[in-house]
Image (cartoon, coloured by chain):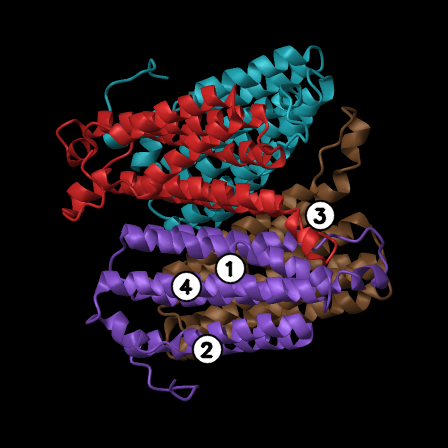
Chain colours: A cyan, B red, C purple, D brown
């Protein structure tokens, strides 16, 4: 029950984050295609943010599915994750308004790195609470995908100081890695054997 | 449980989409009826969007009711549907600000066609997961209403290039077709025998 | 389950309606008390809208508690209620910006009358579905409070054509009538015998 | 069930309050770091508000967990709490826009004091309904932390008339006191013996 309300609150916050971003898409006053075309970069950045938040929701969904109980540490680790995720739209909008500029590409990497760290801290808080012998601990195993993401975000941030396009390439790469929901957990719980990925 | 959280997240996103549209209704500063009358087109487009999102919520509600379990493919098919639905208010607002203009009537058709395709993909993902022998597969049968909608949206988009009024006539027609929740599913699950429609 | 998701979607929409109204409270740029005082009328109208939406949520909560199953008619009666409630903030804001003006006081009455009619239609749809022998039908009995509200809103609208202050007096009176959650239903379900009101 | 919907509605409102605050973080048009730096005070005030709302959500979560049933008084005490919490972002934004100014520091204390009083009233309404013999009554015991908070907010408001910095020091102190979820309740329900705090 405890856990259900944590999931409900997280769902609410994530649903709002993913939706209020669309308010950035200002309706053009002119009825011409050219006026619509001007909103394209904001549309692309909205799409990117939507995918990122959806990835976090899906992984969060799988993670909490494997949790049996919740303590104060987990509540706050979750709040921390929600806080950083709530800033993703801001960073994406800044990036969307200034294509290929250096500074927004660096901030964007930072805005993606922080929720990734917060998610790692949430996993640690859950593992500490569940005990290492439990299903979850076995399911997560050695978190190669998570470690790779952190490394790629840092590479992206460093790349942003030189060439923003390389930075975005790193960020898109991480999105692709996570686009498939966390099969490490799904695999053990549901005993799914058909791997679309080679085992990490 | 899995499925409940998918429903909860979808409810959250749909509730926000349906409600933030009302923010487009700017409060007039003058207290005259004429000032209020100027907000009428935006009010009409808000009403139309509200009906469309409510239709999707009702159908989504019936569809998930018939689902027994959820996999990663269904999660992403659902996210895809939510993404396209989140863009309906934008297209409606553009149409609302430029009555009977050609371009917005075409974009509006596109904004309705995309969630319709996404919904079809969600149904396919669910059927694939449930297996064709299950209740749901029998309930959906040959999806005449869905196929008709896709055809009517495409007709509307083509009509929009010539006469926007015809385009909107097609879109309103689809809304009427769907205004009654998907009885194909309700009929078999609840064994409702009093059909208000002739069987599809 | 059916019913739970209807409640969840309604909760989401009502939670958003009640909260986005606070966005109308623009933060003054000056740090003076006088700048804050200018936001007072908007604050009062926000408070009034908050109370009205909270009344509907509480009554809706009690009503659905007594419902055992949901059909398509109930889903759409509920959507209709949510639609009209979503317009309450707009009418309240127009009233808030134009104190004691004639037109906003009339629109405000209309904006309160429509959800009241929609709520009545929802009750009728539920009674039709449940059957007159059920707990709910006995609990609602002859809906004196609801009938009184409709009459008072119409009185308020008529009064608005002559003297807006009288109109608001009628609206505030209705709020007081409903501020206590619908004890007609609570009384029979929970067999509460301590009535704070004389029986209607 | 009753209680679940109260929790769901509260979760919705709190999720929206905590998230719409990020809309105050306007995206700078320039891609320079200096443009980003200008948003720093708003970011800090967003962070502070986020922590406060998260504290209330966590405490509310623990409080409702210990509740067995809900009556009309509790519903309205909860609505009252949500109303005052919905005004926290406004006060924080006013404070954020006018650093160290006297008036906003006083209003900020008031905006924190009112939800604290409302929370106390909610606890009283719940205790009245549950009866003093129940788990909850024993768990809450003598509410030293709550009483200290009320006193500290009043100290902060008074300090604000002289030196705003002292006012904020009081408010931050209260946040630290509450940052750990209400262990008084958790301790008795879950029999947690590892206290991070000395017993209050």
**Secondary element at tag 2:** helix
What chain does mark 4 sit on?
Answer: C
Q: Residue C88 appears in which quarter of the rendering?
A: bottom right
| Residue D188: percent from left, percent from top | 40, 65
| Label drawn at residue C148 | 2
Kindly identify which residue carries mark 4.
C119
Q: CA distance from mark 3 to mark 2?
A: 46 Å
Crowd band around label 2 with a 10 angstrom C-alpha radius: few (<14), some (14–19), many (20+):
few
Residue drawn at 46 percent across, 77 percent down: C148
Vertical comparison of A93 with B59: above or below? above
Crowd band around label 3 with a 10 angstrom C-alpha radius: few (<14), some (14–19), many (20+):
many
Q: CA distance from mark 2 to mark 1?
A: 40 Å
Q: CA distance from mark 4 to mark 3?
A: 40 Å
What chain does mark 3 sit on?
Answer: D
**Secondary element at tag 1:** helix
Vertical comparison of D89 with A177: above or below? below
Crowd band around label 1 with a 10 angstrom C-alpha radius: few (<14), some (14–19), many (20+):
many
Q: Residue D190 appears in which quarter of the rendering?
A: bottom left
Q: Are marks 4 and 3 in contact (CB under 8 Å)?
A: no
What chain does mark 1 sit on?
Answer: D
Q: Left or right of C172: which side holds A94?
A: right
| Residue A36: percent from left, percent from top | 62, 23
Q: Are marks 4 and 2 in contact (CB under 8 Å)?
A: no
Kindly identify which residue carries mark 3.
D45
């Amino acid at each position: 029950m405890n856990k259900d309300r944590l999931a409900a609150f997280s769902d609410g916050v994530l649903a709002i984050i993913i939706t209020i971003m669309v308010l950035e898409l200002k309706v053009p006053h002119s009825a011409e295609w050219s006026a619509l075309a001007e909103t394209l970069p904001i549309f692309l950045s909205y799409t990117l943010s939507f995918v990122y938040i959806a990835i976090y929701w899906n992984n969060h969904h799988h993670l909490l599915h494997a949790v049996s109980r919740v303590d104060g540490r987990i509540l706050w680790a979750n709040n921390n994750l929600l806080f950083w995720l709530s800033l993703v739209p801001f960073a994406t909008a800044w990036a969307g308004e200034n294509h290929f500029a250096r500074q927004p590409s660096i901030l964007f990497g930072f805005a993606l790195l922080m929720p990734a760290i917060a998610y790692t801290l949430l996993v640690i808080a859950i593992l500490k609470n569940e005990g290492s012998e439990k299903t979850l601990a076995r399911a997560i195993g050695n978190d190669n995908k998570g470690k790779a993401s952190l490394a790629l975000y840092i590479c992206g941030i460093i790349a942003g100081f030189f060439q923003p396009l390389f930075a975005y390439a790193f960020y898109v790469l991480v999105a692709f890695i996570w686009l498939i929901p966390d099969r490490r957990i799904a695999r053990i719980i549901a005993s799914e054997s058909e791997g679309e990925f080679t085992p990490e």
